[in-house]
Image (tube, rainbow, N blue to C red):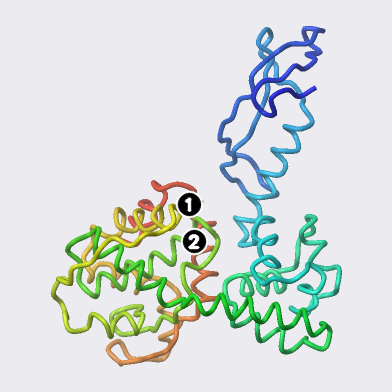
Amino acid sequence: MMENSFNTIIQYCEHCDKEVTCNVVEKYETMNSFGNEASILTKRAYCPYCQHELWVGELHDFNLTQRQAAWRRENGYLSIKQLEELPVKYNIGKRPFSQAIGLGEQTFTNYLNGSIPNKSIQHLLVKVYNNPAYYLELVEQNKNLLNEITIIKTIKAAHDLLGRNESSTLFLYAAYIIAKCGDVTPLQLQKMLYYTQACFIIFYNKLAFTDECEAWVHGPVYRNLWEKYKDYKYESISQAVQVPQLKSDEEAILNIVIEYFGKYSGKVLEEFTHKELPWLKAREGLAQNEPSNRIIDNDLIFEYYTSIKNKYNIVSLADIQSYIDKLW
């Protein structure tokens, strides 16, 4: 029997042949998560007399759920929580949402219940999660499967998401970095925002923003941001900026970027990006100093940093430094 869920339990110990009261121990363990090793938060109960682990159904279910969540993270799949967010953010029921994105009426519900989509469908779900404009394209393609009221409501929700001005997120993050660093050049700022995108993918499995990133000679560049600060050239941005109000999870990632990437010059960060696939792929066939406005596809950025997270088993801040050391 469970009492005070996941804190204290009374459970039968077969070794002591009696019921015992014990605390539930939370700890991170390196476990095999369906073929891959991962650091997973587990909850276990031990007999206070003989120290044997007790089998508790609720704890077993919790640990299994944690293993499944780790597998999803390691393989670039949306979490169950992220899947649940999809019909809510687009103001549509689960079944019509499934049809709106081109799946069978029951298919999305099956995924919510734990079924694993194939890679192509998972790619679609991630893109829909990150890109309301892409969702609107799918709704247009499949509107014959939806009733008029549903179409109106979900299109409005998608436009509302777009109307929040995705680019303003980029500029808010830029303002935060400028205000916190106090001494940052436009080149350095561009690369720190690029690595903000990378860290959001690694730690939150989502894009920080959907602004297009161009593969310039000196690395990834967000053109609108470049237009704003281009007059500073190679000098530090001297514009007075107040620290914007952000969510705690946003600040957490930006503080990681400032601590781990902000200590390097813009030229060093540029060299880092030149060693990574997204910039290299976008500039295939171009000469070293050939100007270009080719787009570094956000899907490629997402896939690349998901693979980096898996390859280097990045689960902590220390792991970020280890990856930087490899680039260095």
Q: Which residue is mark 2?
A: 308
Q: Quadrant of residue 215?
A: bottom left
**In which quadrant is the C terminus drawn?**
bottom left
Is residue 29 shown left or right of residue 47? left
In the picture, the disc for residue 110 is none
| 169, above or below 24, in the image | below
Give 239 or 255, whichever is nearer the viewer.
239
Residue 141: x %, y % from top left: 74, 89
Give 305 or 258, whichever is nearer the viewer.
258
Q: Which residue is mark 1?
A: 314
Is residue 82 shown left or right of residue 285? right
Secondary-structure class at tag 1? loop
Q: Does the CB distance between marks 2 and 1 fall below 8 Å? A: yes
Distance (Cα) linking label 2 and label 1: 8 Å
**Residue type marked 1:** Ile
- Residue drawn 29% across the image and 82% down it: 226
**Residue type marked 2:** Ile
Q: Are there few (<14), some (14-19), or many (20+) residues within 10 Å of tag 2?
A: some
Secondary-structure class at tag 2? helix
Is residue 30 shown left or right of residue 45? left
Residue 268: x %, y % from top left: 24, 67
**In which quadrant is the N terminus drawn?**
top right
- Residue drawn 56% across the image and 35% down it: 28
Q: Are there few (<14), some (14-19), or many (20+) residues within 10 Å of tag 1?
A: many
Q: Earlier in the sequence, mark 2 or mark 1?
A: 2
Give 326 or 64, whichever is nearer the viewer.
64
Give 198 or 243, whichever is nearer the viewer.
243
- Residue drawn 50% across the image and 81% down it: 297
Is residue 22 shown left or right of residue 240? right
Q: Quadrant of residue 82?
A: bottom right
